[in-house]
Amino acid sequence: MKLHQESNNALNTITSYGDGFVAINLERHEGSVIVMPETPEAWPVSSFEALTPENFDVLVKAGPEVAIFGSGSKLHFPHPRLTAQLAKHRIGVETMDFGAACRTYNILMSEGRRVTAALLIED
């Protein structure tokens, strides 16, 4: 009997990551990115210090049940004023370092959860 890994190519999976990049379905991104199961999109943020509430507000339109914030190589927690709109819409926010955010996104996405990852890749 042969076993085959089941995959759904319609969903975005983080296939690799490292210093200054993340690959989504083998496509390399070298800037900050928002990853959703259906589509990734550029996230115009270049440093943790430059984050604004509007940067997190764009996550609301995807309607996730949880948003994962990959804060870069070090764990940085955003001020609650930055994620206030997410809380207002009852969207959970989890902050992790970059690698943990990538792995957690893949697990939750593969379970069929409505998840979004905002991955900060600093210049």
Image (tube, grey):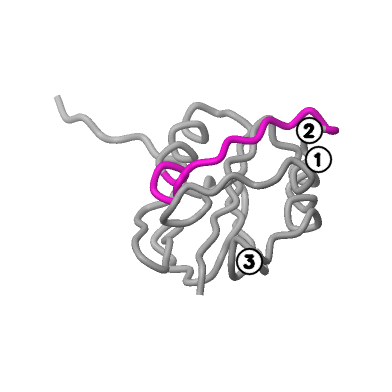
Mark 2 or 3: the one toward you: 2
Q: Describe residue 39's horizontal placement relative to residue 73 as left or right.
A: right
Crowd band around label 2 with a 10 angstrom C-alpha radius: few (<14), some (14–19), many (20+): few
Q: Which residue is mark 1?
A: 84
Q: Which residue is mark 2?
A: 87
User: For this rendering, which residue is in front, 35 or 98?
Assistant: 98
Q: Describe residue 102's horizontal placement relative to residue 40 as left or right.
A: left
In the image, residue 69 above or below residue 111: below
Disc 3 marks a residue whose amino acid type is Ala
Disc 2 marks a residue whose amino acid type is Ala
In the image, residue 16 above or below residue 113: below
- Residue at 73% x, 51% y is 56
- Residue at 52% x, 35% y is 109
Question: Marks 2 and 1, Cα distance to the nearest angstrom?
Answer: 5 Å
Residues shaded magenta: 88-102
Question: Marks 2 and 3, Cα distance to the nearest angstrom?
Answer: 23 Å
Where is residue 40 shown, x and y percent of the image?
60, 57
Q: Is residue 104 magenta?
A: no
Where is residue 51 shown, x and y percent of the image?
69, 60
In the image, residue 51 above or below residue 96: below
